[in-house]
Image (cartoon, rainbow, N blue to C red):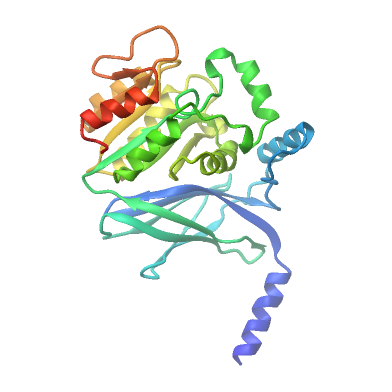
Amino acid sequence: MRSLVVLVALAGAAHSKPAYLVSYGAYGSPDAIVARGRAHKGKPPSDALARPKIDKVVGTVKAFAGRDLERPLVALTDVATGRTVEARGNGDGFYEVRLPGPFPPGPRRLTVALRDAKYAADPVDETAVVVDQGFVLVSDIDDTIVDTGVTRGKAELVGRVLASDAGDVKPLPGAAETLGAFAGAGIPIIYLSASPVELAPRLRQAFALRGFPAGPIFLRHYEDDGIGDPSAYKRRALAKLAADLPRARFLLLGDNGEKDPAIFAAVARDTGRVAHRFIRMTVAGAPGDGAFAFGSFAELRAFAREQKLIP
C-alpha cells in the first residue's frame, strides 16, 4: 500500500507545472517568527555570473516580468520541533507566514514550502534570529553599504541595474566587515531599501558573495508602495519591524543622500526604541540631531566599539 501511495504522489508531481519561491528571509521575537517572500510560475531566472551584457539584460527583464502565482498556499515549518503553519499569499504572489511561539532567543532553522496541487516548487531553507530585548541593526542598501550611485542620477542607475547581476554589485570598503562585526556580536541584520522588490534574489546573492551577513530584506513593490519619495514606504517598514519585534531596540544605518536622517529621526521619536542612528555622509549636509555621522566604515566600527556594541 505504501508503495502505491508513493507512486501516486510521484505521478502527481510529474504532471505539476514548475514554480519557484523567492524568499525575503525570516525574523522573529519570542512571540512569533515571520517568513516573507513571493511565489512565481515557471522556472527562476538564471543566477549565473560573468555572463555577456545582453544575457544580464535578459535576466533582469525576466526578473521584472515574472508571472505571479496568485494566492499561493505556503507552509512554514520550524525544523527543530516540526511545527508547521500555513498561510495564503495575495494576488501578486506575496506571502507572509507567521509561526506562533514561544521561542527562545537565538537562531531557528526553518523550511518554507509551496503547497499547490497544480504547481511544484523547491522548498526554501531559512534561518530566523529570534530577538527579545536585544539590538537589531536595520541597514539601508543603496549608497550606504553598496555603491549604486543613487546620488549620481536615476537614469544612470536604471541603465546600470538593467545590465548587471549579483557579481556587479560593489560593496563600499569595510561595509561587509562592519556588518559582520555587528552580526558576530549577536546583533541580527535586516536590510531595508526603496529599490524594487524584483531585485531581492540579486541582492541576497550579492551579499553572500561579498561576505555580508545573511538577513531578511525589505524592498519596495512599486504597484503598492509608489515610485516617488520613499519616506512613507521606509517608515511603514520600520513601523512593521517595531511591531513584529516589540521588545527589541534598533540600530538604524543609512546615508544622507536622500531622506534617511529625517526618516530615522521620526522613527526614533515614534517608537522610543532606537538606540543609535548611523548616517554615512555622501553629500554635504547634516546627519540629523543625535545621529552619528561617518565617512568610512572604520569610523563606524570605532564608534561601535566605544559604545560597546561590538568587541
Q: Residue at x 64, y 17 (%)?
A: 156
Coordinates of residue 62 in the picture (x, y in percent): 71, 40
Q: Quadrant of the C terminus?
A: top left
Which of the 4 image quadrants contains residue 159?
A: top right
Residue 204 falls left or right of residue 183: right
- State the residue at coordinates (70%, 59%): 18
Position of residue 242 measured from the top left corner of the image (x, y, whole percent): 30, 38
Q: Is residue 272 left or right of residue 264?
A: left
Name the one closer to the observer, 81 or 295. 295
Q: Residue furthest top?
A: 284
Q: What residue do we see at 45% from left, 25% from top?
A: 144
Picture residue at 52% right of the left edge, 20% below the top = 228
- The total of numbered circles placed on residues is 0
Q: Is 93 on the left or on the right of 217, as rendered? A: right
Residue 210 position, x and y percent, is 52, 38
Residue 163, by quadrant, is: top right
Residue 139 placement, left or right of 219: left
Residue furthest to the bottom: 1
Question: Which quarter of the rendering shows the N terminus?
Answer: bottom right
Q: Tell me: residue 284, above or below residue 49.
A: above
Q: Is residue 147 above or below residue 73?
A: above
